[in-house]
Image: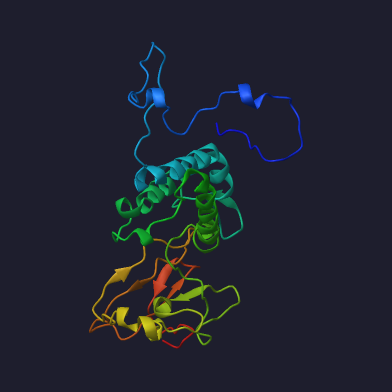
Amino acid sequence: LPPPSTGGGGGGGGGNLDSTFYPTMTPTAEDKDNTSPPATTGQQQPPSPSSPSTPNIIEEQATTKVYDWLEVRKQELNDEVFQSITKDGVNYRSYWFQYNDFIKALKVSNGGRRGSITGDPKHSFYLGNLGYEWEYGVINIAAFLAHAMTSSIKYDACDEFHTDQNTDVDAVKTPSDEFYAISNSCGQYGFNYVDYHCEEDERHMECAVDKNMNLQATTSQIYPSAPPPLSCRPRSVSESYTGYWDVGTGEEMVVFPYENSFGR
């Protein structure tokens, strides 16, 4: 301990400074020639300072706390977060979005170069570095799940699906008709996806349209006779137009051209 200040100040304690011994900062004359540590007498010595922790070890201090925090709330997350809603407004445990799968994905996307798919640390899911920063990770997870709940988990779908119905007014016969244009894959609610472009400063990353691409979504809404997942394919020689999906019959009808809301 450092010696007490000898400057003026309120007195108290009545200690005798002259008779009190305080450690010196340098060896005294009698032990200058013997500066080796004193011999131990069976008393356990404190461990020598270790080298600074590596970034990975420091990072694990935060991630471990995050995963522990999530595990304690597993049931609560399953009951309140990973919940989907049927077309009639009934809640049910999501089929596509599960707690265990979320944890697996989180571990893949977190962890710097060890977890980044691109190999760039900035593309990893941040859960904190130092141990006391784990709450930043929890906040990031809350923001991510809140967005996922409104755009994916709620509908139990990880792809865009048919929502724009009865877009060709000439084909609708009754108010109860539920027709979905097959060309919704090209755009819904007046949008034409082929016209989408990156911002000017990111235009160099834009991919050219592949007119020969065959692509089908994985998920769609889950209810009886629901329209199938969206799909895109090149037009065949025998196919001059696309039709619509009739929820009433649970069939795709291609007897006449059926437009989406953009007119395709």
At x 43%, y 80%, the residue is 187
Front position in the image: 102 or 106: 106
Q: Identify the image quadrant of residue 14.
A: top right
At x 51%, y 53%, the residue is 141
Q: Is residue 207 above or below residue 23?
A: below
Q: List x then y, in percent, for residue 108.
A: 35, 50
Front position in the image: 156 or 16: 16
Q: Identify the image quadrant of residue 183.
A: bottom left
At x 41%, y 68%, the residue is 251
Q: List x then y, in percent, for residue 243.
A: 40, 79
* Quarter of the figure with the C terminus: bottom left
At x 58%, y 42%, the residue is 76
For residue 131, side relative to residue 208 (left or right): right
User: Can you name the residue that lies furthest to the top here?
Assistant: 42
For residue 41, side relative to residue 74 (left or right): left
Q: List x then y, in percent, for residue 142.
A: 55, 54
Q: So how many labels did they put on this image?
A: 0
Front position in the image: 89 or 128: 128
Q: Is residue 227 above or below residue 183?
A: above
Q: List x then y, in percent, for residue 151.
A: 51, 64
Q: Is residue 193 above or below residue 226?
A: below
* Quarter of the figure with the N terminus: top right
Q: Identify the image quadrant of residue 12.
A: top right
Color theme of the render:
rainbow
